[in-house]
Amino acid sequence: MKKRLVYHLILVVVMVFVFTGSAFSGKRANREEVVAKVAQAAQMIREIGRDEAIAKMSGPKHPFIWKNAHVFLMDAESGVVLAHKRQAAQGFQMRNYKDAEGGRPYADVLEFAKQNDSGWKTYMTRRSGRTPLLKYSYYLKLADENIILCSGYYPAIAAYTDQAKATRAECVDMVNQAVQEINEKGLETALKNIDDSKGHYVWKNSYVFCIHDEDGNLLAHPFFRRKGFPMKSYRDAEGNKPFVDILKIANTDGKGWKNYMFEQSGEAPKLKKTYFVKVADKNVIVAAGYTD
């Protein structure tokens, strides 16, 4: 009875938004939208079943991505991600996710869900090279499917977005400096410096990173701590694989630019323009990008 009442209340919220026409405007998701989208996703799961819903909600073009938010699914017992807009996140153990303050918010969500079918959790999200953001995350448990649906929003706090933007010329200059360091000091030393999140190659809202020129695996990055990650598999907000093109261009022309839709926590996707240079005798591609 309790579970059914929760579902009915959430569906009322959905209908209010449909008929008022006020939902889903602008670029920043809000609290009401999050609840409504989760309710819609829950209804779809009940209608088409767990397996089909997981397939439908996996990848960057699933139906519950909007503005700067999305719905994802995790197993209600294990906490393993079942469906996510970032396919690389599927299978990740959310119990182990640490926020910017060292907390484990989804371990709390899993415990909360044992007592209440829905609720909220706030935490500070980490952002590559930028100030952490306060996030309000909503969860809804579907006990019959053993699924927890999660989504969240970021309050509009101007201080979070007041960060100077890198320019096109700066990206070219920083990449060239990194290439020079690789040639003069050796690859190992340069990669170590590029890995430093407080080092020279991190400035404003940008940074230099490096990938292997053949397989595209990540060699150095100041914030993304997954060395060896196959960047050829990375999909942008539109589902494209920009690093497949970067590898082709770099291995043909030696350097170039690539535009793609980049997502940053708490923000809507933005067009990112990335400059890259191949250091042929070191089998490395050095890159940095900016957003308009």
Image (cartoon, helix red, strand yellow):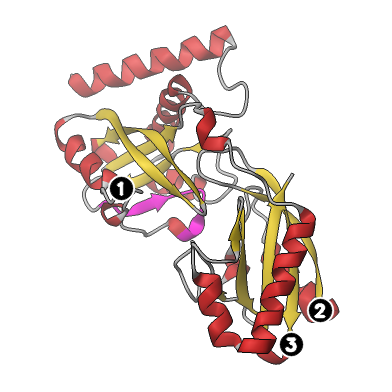
**Region rendered in magenta:** 79-88
Q: Residue furthest right?
A: 253
Report the residue at 74% width, 69% height from top.
276
Q: Position of residue 16 (x, y in %)?
A: 48, 10
Q: Sequence-wise, which precedes: disc 3 or disc 2?
A: 2
Q: Sequence-wise, which precedes: disc 1 or disc 2?
A: 1
In this rendering, position of residue 187 left or right of residue 45 = right
Rendering quarter of residue 177: bottom right
Q: Disc 1 vs disc 2: which is toward the camera?
A: 1
Q: Is residue 233 above or below residue 262?
A: below
Q: Position of residue 123 (x, y in %)?
A: 33, 39
Q: Nearer the viewer, residue 124 or 6?
A: 124
Label 3, label 2: how far apart the Cα atoms are: 8 Å
| Residue 161 included in the magenta stretch of the image | no
Q: Is residue 176 above or below residue 213?
A: above
CB-based contact (under 8 Å), mark 3 and mark 1: no
Q: Nearer the viewer, residue 198 or 81?
A: 198
SS assignment at label 2: loop
Q: Which residue is mark 1?
A: 101
Quadrant into which the C terminus falls: top right
CB-based contact (under 8 Å), mark 3 and mark 2: yes
Q: Amino acid under label 3?
A: Ala
